[in-house]
Structure formats: C-alpha cells, structure tokens
Image (tube, coloured by chain):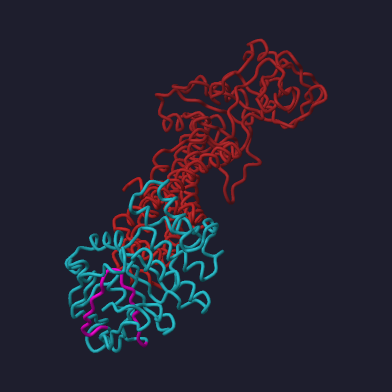
Chain colours: A red, B cyan
Amino acid sequence: MLLNALLLALHEIRRNLMRSFLTVLGIVIGVAAVITMVTLGNGATQMVATQIASLGSNLLMVMPGQRLGPGRDSAGAPKFRIADVEAIQQQIGGLKAVAPVVGSSVTLVAGTQNWSSTVNGTTNDYLISGNWKLAAGRPFSDDEERAGKAVCIIGNTVKRELFGNQSPLGNSIRVKTFDCEVIGLLAAKGQGGMGQDQDDTVLMPLKTVQRRLTGTLDIGGIMVSLKDTADSAIAMTQLRSLLRERRKLADNVDDNFNVMDTRQIAETLSGTIGTMTALLGAVAAVSLLVGGIGIMNIMLVSVTERTREIGIRLAIGALENEVLLQFLIEAVVLSAFGGLVGIALAFVACLGLSTLMHMPFLFNPGINLTAFAFSAAIGIVFGYVPARRAAQLDPIAALRHE
Amino acid sequence: MAVAELGAPLIELRTITKTYGAGQAAFQALRGVDLAIAEGDFVAVMGPSGSGKSTAMNLLGCLDTPTTGEYLFRGINVERLERNQRALLRRSCLGFVFQGFNLLARTAAQENVELPLLYRGEPAEARHASARAALDKVGLAGWEHHTSAELSGGQQQRVAIARAIVTNPLVLLADEPTGNLDSKRSHEIMELLTRLNREQGITVIMVTHEPDMAAYARRIVHFVDGVVASDECHSALKPCC
C-alpha cells in the first residue's frame, strides 16, 4: 500500500508539474532567503569581531588636540616630541610597547608602477602595539632607527600594487626624492573596523620620515600598548597626568590632547553587533513567515481541483487512507525536495556573496535545520489538511465541490 | 453470464429516504423508494429533474448515504458497512460513468483507465494489458496516450466507460452518460452499453431523461417526486420483471 501510494504520489507530481514547481519554488525561496540572510549576518558579525581583535586589545592611542566635537579646536594644539615618548616609556609601568607615529601621504614608485599610500614613521614597537606580524624580511635594526636610514617595511596592498607576485625584499621604492630599500613585508590584516584597508601602509624609521618627508621633529601620535594584566583605566590616568605636566597645563585648562582606549571602541562595537544580531533574527523570522504564507497559498489555491480529484479517486474505489497517504507523500516529497534545493541554493549564494563582500563564510546548521523544518512543516500541513477534509466527505460531495 | 440466468435481486432498496438540509429548509429528495434489480438487467431510470433519480443513483453507487431505509447488495446491508468497506465494494463490484466524465485532468487515457487497477494493487504489466483491452473494447485503440483535453466529448465518455469496466464490475452505474453528447455520439455510447450488458452480462443502471436513450434498456423505472411512479419492461425486448 505504501509503495502504491508512493507511485501514485509521484504520478501526481509529474502530472501537475506546474503546481509542483510552484510549491517547490515557494519552499526553495523561503528556505534560501532565511538561510542566506542569517549566514551572511553571522559572517558580518564575525568579521567585525575579527577587526576588533586586529586593532590590538589593550591599546591606548594618544593624539594631540582635544577630543573631536562641536566647539573644539585641535588645530593649534602642540604636537608631541620624541622626549614625550621617552618620558612615557620611563615613567609609566605595565607597558608592553610605546610607538611614536608620524604619518605622511606620498606617491610610491617602483619600476613602472606607482601607488599612493601613507608612510608611517615609527619604531619597531609599532609592530607590537599594532598587532602586526612580519610575513617576510626583518624589522628595523637599531642602527637604521638611530641613523634614519632609507629602509621600509611595506603592507600587503602596497606590495601587490608595486611588485605583483614578486618578492619585494631587497628592491627599492622611490619616495619623493629618495630611494628606499624594502627590508620587510607585513602579514595581511584585511579591512579595519572603519572599513579602511589596513594593509595599505608603509613603515619607515621615525627619523627617516621626520628628516626626509615632514621636515619637522613633530610626532603625530603615540600608540601605547599595555601588558595584558595592566588596568587600562589606571594607565590612562597616569598617562594623562604625565602629559598634562609635560605640557604645563593649569588645573582649570582642558586637555589639549586626547587618549583613546581601543577597549572602549571594542565595547561600543560589541553593542552594535548585539543590535545587528537581534535585527537579523527579526528579519529571518519575517522572511520565514512570508515564505510560509507563499507555500500555504499554493497549497490552498489547488484545493478545489484536488477535492474533485479526491472525489473521482474515492468513486472508483480508493480507500480514504490510500488517498490520504498519497497526498501526504506528495506533500512530503515536494517539501523535502524544495527544502534541500533551498539549502543548496543558500549555500551557493552565501559562498558567492561572502567572497564578494570579503566576509568569512560560516555554515550555521541551526538555521539550515530550522528553515527546512519550518517550511517543510507548512508544506505538509497545508498539503495534507485540505486533502484530509476532502477525503472524509461522501465521494459525491467531493465530486461536486466547487 | 447469459440473460437467461436472471435470478434473485442483486440490488434491493427498501423504503429508502434521503433528506437534504434540516428544519424548514429540509428537502426530501427520496420519500420511500422500493426497488429490486436483478443481475444482468439493463435498467433506465427516468423522471423530471428533482424527481430524485440522480440521488437514487448515487445511493446505489455508495457515493452517498440514505437518511433512512435499507440498501441490500447481494443480500448484504450496505448501510451497516463502514466507509472503507463501502469503498472496497465500489472497488470490486461497481463501475461509474458520470455525465461530466470526471476523468483526471492532464492525464493520458490509458492512465485514467489504469487508475482503478492501481488501487487494486495489480502489477504494472497486467494493468497496461487490461487498460489497453478495455480501451479497445470501447473503440479507442490507438488513443491510449491522448489526454482528456485532446479527446472529444464522446471519446472522453468512452474512456470513462473503459475505466468503469476495466475491473469487470458486476454493476455499471451511469448517471446521464449521454447528457453532454450529441445524438450520434449518444447512440454510439448506448450501443456500447447495450453490448456490455448483453455480451458480458454486466448489470447496467442508467439515469437519463431522453426517451430514445431509455429505449435501449430492458426496463424503465420512472421517478416522480422522490418515489417510483412506474416500473415497466420495454415492449421490444424479452420480459424481464
């Protein structure tokens, strides 16, 4: 009887290809939309989390000028000098690295290629505080730092634009009026928290940039990296009082510098991620509902035709159970097939879109299962329940159904 | 089965009533029908519309249940059977032909004819052979793979007849089988029914309102206002009742 019903159900699916196709389509779209939405959302969340981690977790960024905001003026604030950096290194405990940074936008030329990027003059401490690793080459030597030699460590984007697939080590890059030897290559980090390309950077010894590019002894900012055990609140207070003292600020005068804690940024971003996750959940629930209504419509639209058909089947001797089993199998086969195609489609879409958007692809079994189960349940319920009602009628009532 | 073997009634209706609706809106379609039909008979049921002839037909075919009264099929009280047992009775003993054909849409003639055999669980080979034989019997050899939409009304009705006879039923019930057909096709269908009755001994019960269709039958039962008004043997044929 089961085999027979299966045979009948498959006959029926083939006979009503259009109706079957629409049913399957409803389920496919419902399932695929929900899975894609949630999977991409998970990927985005994961990406933001990775970016936060790539900032370096225990980092204070010291910049001249007041915190940005209305009515604040940072243009006139004095810059830092190397003496400030040394003072911080000597007088504040619990620090892992203190890196001065002087930035300068330049055009880089290597062979026939050129590329606009930012040169950061700094020390080897920058690699520690910025959480950078070297993919190849070496950091600056003491001699190079002290003498301000023309050497540089380049980011992955700069390497790609200037040297393509070749190794950049030992080659030289022309920066304004001087040639600069590439001694190291930074490991790729990807997009930053604000969407900028972190790999589009060139590092040179601080003195090289000061002498050959900016022409002043000013330092744009200081990156202070704390030991993992250090309390950033205490370090921040110490740092502020030290800098206020060195800049001779009276008690009633506002800071003319600001200190940013990446932990604060991380906390803000975490809150954003929470909101995003909640939003995704809501979107997924709505698309699941919409998909479900689509499936329900297709199933209910064909009730009249199916009721008459059930009448015919009963009249020529089908048992109620045989008819029901057939319709149940039909609903299960269509729903399951649609669900599987939907999952496959979502997989392909997620893979494509996450590559396109440079996001990690995280397969989420939970949402795949939920979307499949929900759509299949709707397909089965709305395929089976009307059939059940029809099969319980007297055959003549089913035949006359309009 | 020869005509001479007419014996005890195959079908017997005892004071059957059927009421649709309830209360003041209730309509009594049958008001106490007694009718006995012998095996091998060919009965035409006539009467004006609303006289209850189609209702009686649906009751005979177990497609509907009477309000009161008894329906005996070969001495078995059908009213005491369960739904599934009545379905099994339809499956094994009854064949139906409807005015509106009631073929499955978008389905080839042969598949339509095979459907009752599928429910009987017959193997594919036997199904195909029986269906082809039945279609051949109604003159549709070569039309096996045409769907309903590709067949004329007369051909569709013949497919329906093939579907009804493919199981070798004891009784063929036809509710206005020629109602949707022109007179040439109607006569073809009637000749087919007559042949099935004479050659295969199938008991044929047919509702019609056309006297020249009823003329093919051996016996004519007239319904008026839900009761049997007259019951006569056709003069041109051998007496039967």
Magenta region, residue range: B30-48
Give the camera-side residue of B226 and A271. B226
- Relative to A180, is A156 on the left or the right? left
Q: Considering only vertical position in the picture, is A127 above or below B111?
A: above
Give the camera-side residue of A50 and B54. B54
Give the camera-side residue of B123 and A295. B123
User: What is the x, y in percent for residue A275?
Assistant: 44, 48
Dividing the picture into quadrants, the one containing residue B49 is bottom left
Q: Which of the image's four quarters has the N terminus of chain B?
A: bottom left
Query: For the stretch drawn in magenta, what is the main secondary structure?
Result: strand
Specify whether residue A328 is in view.
yes
Taking the spot 39% from the left edge, 66% from the top edge, the residue there is B196
Specify whether residue A148 is in view.
no
User: What is the x, y in percent for residue A24?
Assistant: 48, 52
Residue B40 sits inside the magenta stretch? yes
- Relative to A184, is B218 on the left or the right? left
Taking the spot 25% from the left edge, 83% from the top edge, the residue there is B30
- Relative to A91, is B70 on the left or the right? left
Taking the spot 34% from the left edge, 80% from the top edge, the residue there is B45
User: What is the x, y in percent for residue A28?
Assistant: 49, 49
Dividing the picture into quadrants, the one containing residue A397 is bottom left
Q: Considering only vertical position in the picture, is A357 above or below A385?
A: above
